[in-house]
Image (cartoon, rainbow, N blue to C red):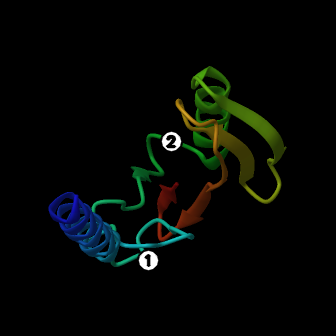
Amino acid sequence: MRRLMIIGIIGVAVLVVVAFWLLSCWPVVNVVETGKTPEYPDITPRRYHATQATVERVFDAALHAVDRLPRWSLVAYQPETGEIRAEARTRQFRFVDDVLIRVEAQNGEVVV
């Protein structure tokens, strides 16, 4: 009986240590901004040459993409400021993430 208790205590201690180690490995970032979050260097702005795309055209394409994405819902959009607000829900637990998409002209390009 005493041996089982010791094994149980050691097992729980190992699980706690592993849990803390796993939590410290993953970047705990609550706000991610395209091109400005070092924990996610692969999330970069999408750029389109202004000769092939206008701000209005790219904005409309982004708006229609939000409408077609599963588990995404459009909250608001403002063409004059180039902002689209949406909510994205996770598949399993239905957590809600707020999404803000900005479409703007910068240096002869349309940037999303």
Say which mark, if any, is on residue 36.
1
Say which mark, if any, is on residue 103.
none
Residue at the far front: name it. 1
Residue lying at 21% horizontally and 65% vertically, measured from the top left: 2
Q: Which one is in front, 83 or 58?
A: 83
Whether residue 2 sits left or right of residue 33 in the image: it is left
Asked if residue 107 is positioned above or below residue 94 in the image, the reply reads below
Q: Position of residue 63 (x, y in %)?
A: 67, 34
Q: Position of residue 11 (x, y in %)?
A: 22, 62
Q: Secondary structure at mark 1?
A: loop
Residue lying at 56% horizontally and 70% vertically, measured from the top left: 31
Q: Which one is in front, 54 or 38?
A: 38
Asked if residue 28 is positioned above or below residue 103 in the image, the reply reads below
What's the amino acid at mark 1? Lys
Q: Quadrant of residue 10?
A: bottom left
Q: Quadrant of residue 36?
A: bottom left
Point out the image quarter for the N terminus: bottom left
Q: Position of residue 30 (x, y in %)?
A: 55, 70
Residue named by callout 2: 53
> Which sits earlier in the primary sequence, circle 1 or circle 2?
1
Decide: few, some or many residues near mark 1? Use Cα within 10 Å; few <14, some 14-19, many ≥20.
Answer: few
Q: CA distance from mark 1 to mark 2?
A: 24 Å
Decide: few, some or many residues near mark 2? Use Cα within 10 Å; few <14, some 14-19, many ≥20.
Answer: some
Q: Position of residue 57 (x, y in %)?
A: 62, 36
What's the amino acid at mark 2? Ala
Q: Which one is in front, 89 or 35?
A: 89
Q: Secondary structure at mark 2?
A: loop
1 or 2: mark nearer the eye: 1
Whether residue 74 sits left or right of residue 92 in the image: it is right
